[in-house]
Amino acid sequence: MTRPVNVMVTGADAPVGERLVRDLLDDSRVDQILAVPWKVGDHLPRDNRLTVVPVDLSSSRRVHRLLFGAARDLNIDIVAHTTLHRSARQEGSRIHRYNVDAIRSLLTLSERHPTIRRLVLRSDAAVYQIQRDLPVLIGEHHPLNMRGNAPQWIRDRVEADITACTRMGMTPLEIVVLRTTEVLAPGTGSQLHDYLQSTICLRPAGFDPMLNLLTIQDAAAAMQRAVHHQAQGVFNIPGADTLPLTAAIRAWGRIGVPVPGSILAPAYRLRSEVTGHDFRYGMNRRRFHYSGVLDGTRAREVLGYVPCHPIRWPSHDGQAASA
Amino acid sequence: MPFPPAVARAIAQATVPAADRERLAGLHFHDAGHGYDAFGMHPDFVTMSTTIVRGLYTKYFRVISSGHEHIPQFGPAILVANHSGNIPIDGMMMWYDVLTHTDPPRVPRAVADHFVPSLPFVGTLFARGGMVGGSRGNARALLESGELLMIFPEGTPAIVKPFRDRYKLHPFRVGHAEMAIRHGAPIVPCGVVGAEEQLPQLTTSKRLGKPFGVPEVPIPAVPVPLPVRYHLLWGPAIPVHKDYTPAQADDPGVVEEAAARVQAAVDALIKKGLKQRKGIFR
């Protein structure tokens, strides 16, 4: 019988990280859990197996202290890095340090760490390029979004992903990158969730691309599978919901209004300025025109991951209630 | 389309005969979770689309077709035909022909040029009917899930060719042959006769197509397609999946040879159709 593993979870104050911590607490294959939130909070459960150490990961010195302090003391075997900075409105060097330099530090320090043997990083489907002449079904070898004019939110995600990928196979450290599709939930940095907060959702006329969406439960389940598996490499993590944009708008109980594409960027820029919403049309323009659905074949075949928690759409809940 | 499937279903119920609706209820289809497949096809939109295409197929172009027994009833296959007519009515006629002559009905997944998904409304309507953008990844995924691909290996240059070049095949691109060998799919050739005369062309304009990413826009001599009679001739399947091993899909010589066999088969079917027909409109 294999001994239980000790796991460190970063981003433990974000929805996916918090859910992963809770799932690991219910997991008999896990002994100690080191939860690393950004700030002190009381959202995590109290448990003898759980240690909470708030750390600002944008500081490499603090990451060093965490790994060679609490993580070493708890004999952490596996690090699950679950989060990137969520807001697209905030940019700058500090955000970059949190998104990219933190991963670089985690990689470098884990490679020479006495107890850590495996690093599971949650990346994002936003790293993929979406355009009309690329496949709708996105495999792990799909071109990445390397456009120079992409916003920092995307550039950081691509850089973080590549930073992890370039270290694969270079040292005994096992590295897994999970490119999760968009988690449609509040607090996850979901652009679509923010978009759906308006009663009227403007969309480009004449286009209705296919989207794939994930739940917090499935994102955490994929992380949990990757924590326990031996496999390394990149895995796409799709969700259980594949549907067109208009169907998502309807299912969320919103009204979709088709408008010429050229007025969408200024309209949503104005919305962002006035109301503080996070959704930026320029960042989502291509996926509001062309379909992009993650192909989860590799995750299914290697990790045994199959999405099984569909989104609870407000309109479906309403129908069920009235029925 | 940007309207709900319920609307498509209602249109289909009002316009498609009950027997056809019942038959199409048994459509071969991979539901990705909300009634659509990952590429955006939806059975209710397929049924609704038959309303529009049926009239063109039976009344306007009065299609005569033969050789449906060569279309596999299940498993992956690639349907390959000549392309012409300035607008892709040939694809629509083939789509309807396959849909109505396979049992259970199969939707041929037309592989369109890159610019088609970027056409507003048209791209979405075609996607709901089963069209996919012309990328290798899309075709691979569909073949691996046992679907029927419909490919025009001459590409867009053939559809906008001048009237004087009718029934002269452009050199076939070889991607279809490579995919068939690699994924173990037979190729079913089809000769389309009639489409070449539907919309005689005066000239083409590259400038008009630029806003939509279309390479060339044809300027036809007539405002609407002429009511020519279409002849669709399906030929025996070319078993490239048996004649070559999947590893040979990487051999350029083998792939070119297989593509040449397909082109010769399509050319023979066109010649047969031209010989059989009694006139452009008959």
Image (tube, grey):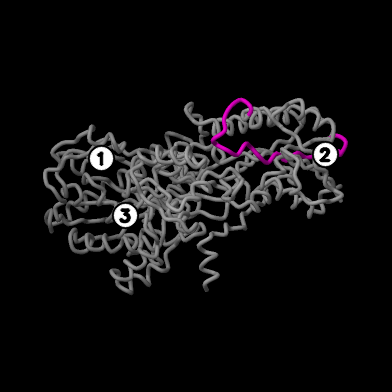
Q: Could you tell me which secondary element the residue under label 2 belongs to?
A: loop
Q: In the figure, residue A178 lies in which quadrant?
A: top right
Residue B71: in magenta span = no
Q: Is residue B19 left or right of residue A193?
A: left
Decide: marks 3, 1 in contact (CB < 8 A)?
no
- Name which residue type carries label 1: Ala
Numbered tag placed on residue B235 in the rendering:
3
Picture residue at 37% right of the left edge, 51% below the top: A257
Check disc 3 and give the amino acid type. Gly
x and y, in percent, of residue A136 in the image: 46, 45
Q: Main secondary structure of the magenta part?
A: loop
Instruction: Say which mark, if any, is on residue A76.
Output: 2
Q: Are marks 3 and 2 on the same chain?
A: no
The stretch of residues the image draws in magenta is A72-94
Whole-percent x and y of residue B36? 45, 57
Residue B44 showing in the rendered view = yes
Q: Looking at the image, is B176 positioned above or below residue B233?
A: above
Secondary structure state at the residue bearing disc 3: loop
Q: Give left or right: position of B24 versus A49.
A: left
Image quarter in which the N terminus of chain B is found:
bottom left
Distance between the Cα atoms at labels 3 and 1?
Answer: 21 Å
Give the CA separation, mark 1 to mark 2. 63 Å
